Amino acid sequence: MEKLLQGKVAVVTGAAQGIGLEIARTLHQHGAQVVLADLDGDATARAAGDIATPDLDCVGAVCDVTAEDQVQTLVANTCRDFGRLDVFVNNAGITRDASLKKMQVADFDAVITVHLRGTWLGIREASAVMREQKSGSIVNISSLSGKSGNPGQTNYSAAKAGIVGLTKAAAKEVAHHNVRINAVQPGLIRTPMTAAMPPDVFAQREADVPMKRAGEPGEVAGAVVFLGSELSSYITGTVIEVGGGRYM
Ligand code: NAP
């Protein structure tokens, strides 16, 4: 049986670890050549080497998603090396949690910049190529935190809610070029990001999930493969929640 992404070329930002790494691995398992982009060149090269198979390439690339020239170079190099761009996943993210009382302007700006400017740059550069190609799918990783609002995450919840508005506005602009843009809102997922949470907070959040467990990065990746593939050919401007039933 033909794989869902056979012959496709994908880029994943923030792909050196966690959800991004698993998205890259799953896109590759479904037949895509994948460019893994992240801040740390050695880590992305190692991750790409682990995923690549003799018959299907995977490469690492250094890219800070907040830097316009680096995102432009990422997209240009992908097109130069692989000849096309079919799936672009805006996954890179950071947290700088603190109560309103303690959060500094720098914590607010850093989170807004990585998530919102980073995703906006990725959308702008990837969609420019895809509209010429007359096909493509962009997937933005938001968070259920952007829907529910999490205390201690006023910066992060604002950024993740912003990604939803950005997704819909951009999707409307490029839909008639056969370029689709959707978002995924993961709930509590077991990654290095959530490993930094105090264990009692993690356990409480897990207990609040109707499925009574945290999700695994591969379970987010499944939704991304669906949105990246032709299985979702008439779906754009939507948000898929991957949260074990949280906030139904
Ligand atoms: P993670 O383990 O911390 O991985 C995020 C990756 O993004 C890291 O490799 C990080 O590099 C990289 N990154 C940070 N800033 C970047 C930048 N400016 N340019 C390029 N790469 C950058 O986080 P994760 O849990 O896998 O999260 C992935 C995405 O899912 C994020 O957007 C996150 O907000 C979202 N999400 C996660 C959860 C969850 O429960 N884990 C839930 C909802 C949504 P460094 O390590 O060097 O900073």
Image (spheres, rainbow, N blue to C red):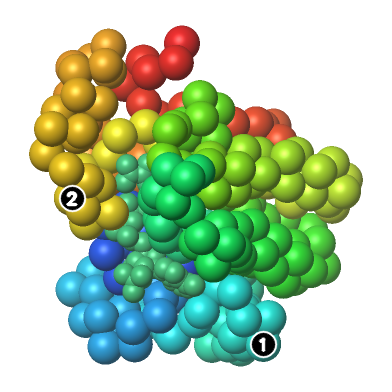
- Which image quadrant for residue 128? bottom right
Element type at marker 1?
A: helix
Q: Which residue is located at x 56 percent, y 73 percent?
A: 65
Q: Which residue is mark 1?
A: 69
The earlier-in-sequence mark between 2 and 1 is 1
Q: Which residue is mark 2?
A: 195
Q: Is residue 66 above or below residue 109?
A: below
Q: Nearer the viewer, mark 2 or mark 1?
A: 2
Residue 79 appears at what percent x and percent y?
62, 81
**Is 192 left, or right, of 44 in this rendering?**
left
Frontmost residue, 206 versus 213: 206
Say if mark 2 contacts mark 1, CB within 8 Å: no
Frontmost residue, 59 versus 247: 247
Q: CA distance from mark 2 to mark 1?
A: 32 Å
Write down which quadrant ligand 1 falls in.
bottom left
Identity, as a three-letter code, of the amino acid under mark 2? Ala
Element type at marker 2?
A: helix
Q: Is residue 168 above or below residue 87?
A: above
